[in-house]
Amino acid sequence: MHHVPTHRLARGAAALAAAATASLVLLTVAGSPAAAAGSARTDPAPAMSDTDITRLLDSADAAVCTEGADAQMRCYTTEADYRAAEGLSGAEVGTLSMSECPSGYFCLWEWTGYGGDRVQYRVAGTKDLYSYWRDRGTSYYNRRAAGGRLVDIRSALPDPNLYFPAGGHHSDLGKESYVYGGNWNNKVDRIVLS
Ligand SMILES: [Ca+2]
């Protein structure tokens, strides 16, 4: 239970400083300050390196990490930054819901009810989650036309799978029973998209 809402409030000042650093990282990586500053962009930001993504995830609680059509990952510190950079219409401020998952994506959230930070994928294949995201997912929405499965990687036992259909969603993996006992909350390490 290392990631609850109060976590962010408790380190507000540090998070602010970290967010400033993270924004700088994004601008540096993008190499295009003018585009990032708000003018319309026709191409998505260049892909971020794993090092940059890890730094952002560890320092500033990146709100959204998203896979582009090029299968590269980009992370943003706020939902607004994400939607602006990807050319999506603005989301209602403060609204946390499954509708923030764009059509064509599989989305995984850290909290119940499609809340908190989100990581999302769109290209079929096997997605091993960043260490930050391992054992963190609590709700999901598969807004894709194909199904897939969630995987909990085990060292000495067969890896359990939780299959989901096209359009499938679950607001609380804590209510999904797990084959070795308990439930699926905070267990997902890998996502396989068909
Ligand atoms: Ca796990």
Image (tube, helix red, strand yellow):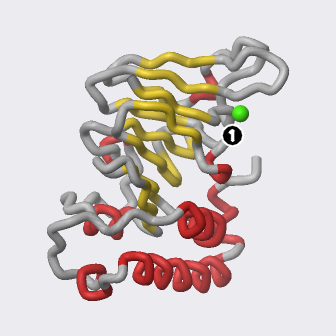
Q: Residue 43, percent across and down?
A: 20, 66
In this rendering, the answer to whether 12 lies above or below 189 is below
* Residue occupied by mark 1: 135
Give the left or right position of residue 28, taking residue 2 as reference.
left
In this rendering, the answer to whether 175 lies above or below 10 is above
Q: Nearer the viewer, residue 124 or 188?
A: 124
Q: State the residue at coordinates (38%, 62%).
A: 79
* Picture quadrant of residue 111: top right
Are there few (<14), some (14-19), or many (20+) residues within 10 Å of tag 1? Answer: some
Picture quarter with the C terminus: top left
Q: Is mark 1 within 8 Å of ligand 1?
A: yes
Ligand 1 lies in quarter: top right
Q: Residue 103, percent across and down?
A: 25, 39
Q: Nearer the viewer, residue 176 or 145?
A: 145
Q: State the residue at coordinates (55%, 26%).
A: 150
In this rendering, the answer to whether 170 lies above or below 133 is above
Q: Amino acid at mark 1?
A: Asp
